[in-house]
Image (cartoon, rainbow, N blue to C red):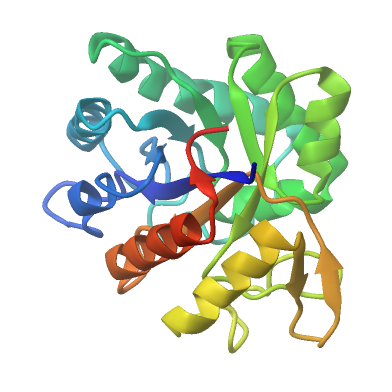
């Protein structure tokens, strides 16, 4: 049986500024990565997002970032492994606290933006994130980029890890994501995004922008909540997956 989790990055509003349509996405996805306040989100938004996820039986995860509200966490910065450990623990604790008062427990952790991409290729940063997750709660699942250093670090540390892929992002031949600064990094055509998702989930491979097929494992697939048309894509993607006999549920 083919099984895949459908996740979305949510809770990315901040104060009076609203981002995405979280409540409609929560009707479709099976797990939610909740912004922790470093790239987006605030205490009110975290509490509301966690509450709405629990109400719909959607798994709650923490979505820690570099401290970069102005850049939405997508700008790289010079940071030590020790600093990464501390900021990830701090952010996990914030969402875990709201999960506890909502009557549930945190299910997973997924790094955001530049932190996610940096740790995908930097072993020391990957190990710092894994250590933060393990030390906070060794039963948490780490969502990490397919084929990345984070996968290797999690497996070495003995914590559960879900290999993550993206329906709406282009890949390079080394299996990493095309940087958002480059043209074509974000796939806006829904049919193409769904076709790519099916390749990754059913055939365990993705066609890179270089024209080469790259093998990968897909345990969970992400739809970015801040992307235009995210709800439409998520609905269409889940419908197509289920029509292909894929069971959509948390890993």
Quadrant of residue 154 within the rendered picture: top right
Q: Nearer the viewer, residue 173 or 178?
A: 173
For the N terminus, which image quadrant? top right
Horizontal side of residue 85 vs 150, given as left or right? left
Q: Is residue 172 visible?
A: yes
- Image point (36%, 38%), residue name: 37
Horizontal side of residue 227 vs 45, given as left or right? right
- Image point (46%, 46%), residue name: 7
- Image point (23%, 32%), residue name: 56
Q: Nearer the viewer, residue 231 or 93?
A: 231
Residue 19 in picture, x, y percent from top left? 24, 58
Q: Nearer the viewer, residue 240 or 231?
A: 240
Residue 98 in picture, x, y percent from top left? 29, 18
Q: Is residue 188 visible?
A: no
Furthest-left residue in this view: 16
- Disc tally is 0
- Image point (40%, 14%), residue name: 105
- Vertical order, 233 against 143 (above or below): below
Quadrant of residue 114 within the rendered picture: bottom right
For the C terminus, which image quadrant? top right
Residue 216 in picture, x, y percent from top left? 79, 57
- Vertical order, 92 against 191 (above or below): above
Residue 244 in picture, x, y percent from top left? 53, 61
């Amino acid at each position: 049986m083919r099984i895949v989790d459908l996740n979305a990055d949510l809770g990315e509003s901040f104060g009076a500024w609203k981002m995405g349509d979280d409540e409609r996405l929560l009707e479709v996805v099976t797990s939610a990565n909740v912004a922790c306040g470093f790239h987006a989100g605030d205490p009110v938004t975290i509490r509301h997002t966690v509450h709405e996820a629990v109400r719909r039986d959607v798994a709650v995860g923490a979505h820690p970032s570099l401290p970069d509200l102005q850049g939405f966490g997508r700008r790289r910065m010079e940071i030590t492994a020790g600093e990464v450990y501390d900021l990830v623990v701090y952010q996990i604790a914030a969402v875990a606290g709201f999960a506890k008062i909502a009557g549930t427990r945190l299910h997973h952790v997924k790094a955001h933006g530049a932190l996610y991409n940096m740790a995908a290729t930097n072993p020391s940063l990957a190990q710092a994130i894994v250590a933060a997750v393990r030390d906070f709660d060794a039963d948490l699942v780490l969502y990490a980029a397919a084929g990345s250093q984070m996968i290797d670090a999690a497996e070495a540390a003995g914590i559960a890890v879900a290999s993550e892929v993206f329906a709406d992002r282009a890949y390079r031949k080394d299996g990493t994501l095309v940087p958002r600064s480059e043209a074509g990094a974000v796939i806006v055509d829904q049919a193409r995004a769904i076709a790519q998702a099916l390749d990754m989930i059913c055939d365990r491979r993705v066609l890179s922008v270089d024209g080469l097929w790259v093998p990968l494992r897909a345990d969970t697939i992400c739809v970015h909540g801040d992307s235009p048309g995210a709800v439409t894509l998520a609905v269409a993607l889940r419908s197509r997956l289920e029509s292909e006999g894929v069971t959509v549920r948390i890993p």
